[in-house]
Image (cartoon, rainbow, N blue to C red):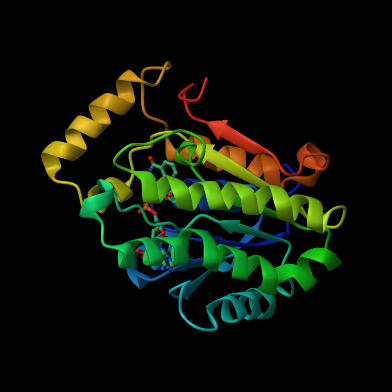
Amino acid sequence: MTLDGKSIVVTGAATGIGRGITECLLKSGASVTMVGRRAEPLRELADGYGDAAAVLVQDICALGAAERIVAAAIERFDGLDAVVNNAGSARFGRLEAIDPAQFDAMFAVNVRAPADLIRCALPQLRANHGSVVNISSVGGVLSMPGRAYYGATKAAMNSLTRSLARELAPDVRVNAILPGPVDTPMWTETGLSEAATDQLRTDLLSSTPMGRLGASTELGRWACLLLDPDLSSWVTGALIPVDGGRTA
Ligand SMILES: NC(=O)c1ccc[n+]([C@@H]2O[C@H](COP(=O)([O-])OP(=O)(O)OC[C@H]3O[C@@H](n4cnc5c(N)ncnc54)[C@H](OP(=O)(O)O)[C@@H]3O)[C@@H](O)[C@H]2O)c1
């Protein structure tokens, strides 16, 4: 891979899919600005990678967050080549059970903050012919009773990806990965009961042709592939399902 020396921001870098992405990037020679709200998991992961890993404790929804993230990456690694919008929030529940304020909060993390980060990174991305990878979800293309708000935020992210791919070409590539079910800490933060979560996991497994959940490392390798200009310089606006066949 030709990610050697690239400066890349990953949001939600320390856990789940973000961890798979960050580790793949660092092992491929990239320098990573790792963003998240909790210092501990970020530091624990960064510790093993020396100077190539920089920790930035930051809520991506806070006022001025995108500017601070871009400035930190430029200061630490002398520029910015790519952004991975991975941080996300999933609150599940039927329409009448979800407070619209939770929808606003989810939209802010899953759509508004990623868009703002791309906007702030744009001068650097343009100058370096960089790229963006958005971690969306199969939920953005499937109908998902009981998870409509989450699906709507990911559909918005898919739309953002395709529109910006055209708007920013040929300088900057913008792609999205649509993971199917992957066992990550997200599953304990959906607002569903343990029994409902177990049922959902069973249902998702039975509707996944490959018969297993995905691994964060698999998603990490796909993100690396899309960020690598040698492998993907002609790929933009792609919504790539990495989902065990769930959308087949
Ligand atoms: N797991 C799945 O089955 C699945 C399927 C499809 C798509 N996805 C998508 O994959 C992405 C990663 O999720 P995951 O499954 O790996 O779950 P996860 O481990 O819970 O990852 C979410 C990450 O985002 C960070 N984060 C959340 N809100 C943030 C905020 N406001 N500011 C900064 N960082 C924030 C969290 O760190 P802090 O709490 O420390 O901030 C955490 O590291 C999400 O976009 C999710 O929608 C997951």
Residue 121, x across and y down, in percent: 70, 70
Q: Is residue 203 left or right of residue 31?
A: left
Q: Please, is residue 118 above or below residue 169 in the view?
A: below
Q: Please, is residue 67 above or below residue 166 in the view?
A: below
Residue 8, x across and y down, in percent: 65, 61
Residue at image location 19% in from the left, 31% down from the top? 199
Q: Quadrant of ligand 1?
A: bottom left
Q: Is residue 137 left or right of residue 191?
A: right
Residue 117 quadrant = bottom right
Q: How many discs appear? A: 0
Q: Please, is residue 183 above or below residue 113 in the view?
A: above
Q: Is residue 47 left or right of residue 198?
A: right
- Image quarter hosting the N terminus: top right
Residue 181 quadrant = top left
Residue at image location 42% in from the left, 31% down from the top? 214
Residue at image location 79% in from the left, 72% down from the top? 123
Answer whether residue 62 is visible to the viewer in this image: yes
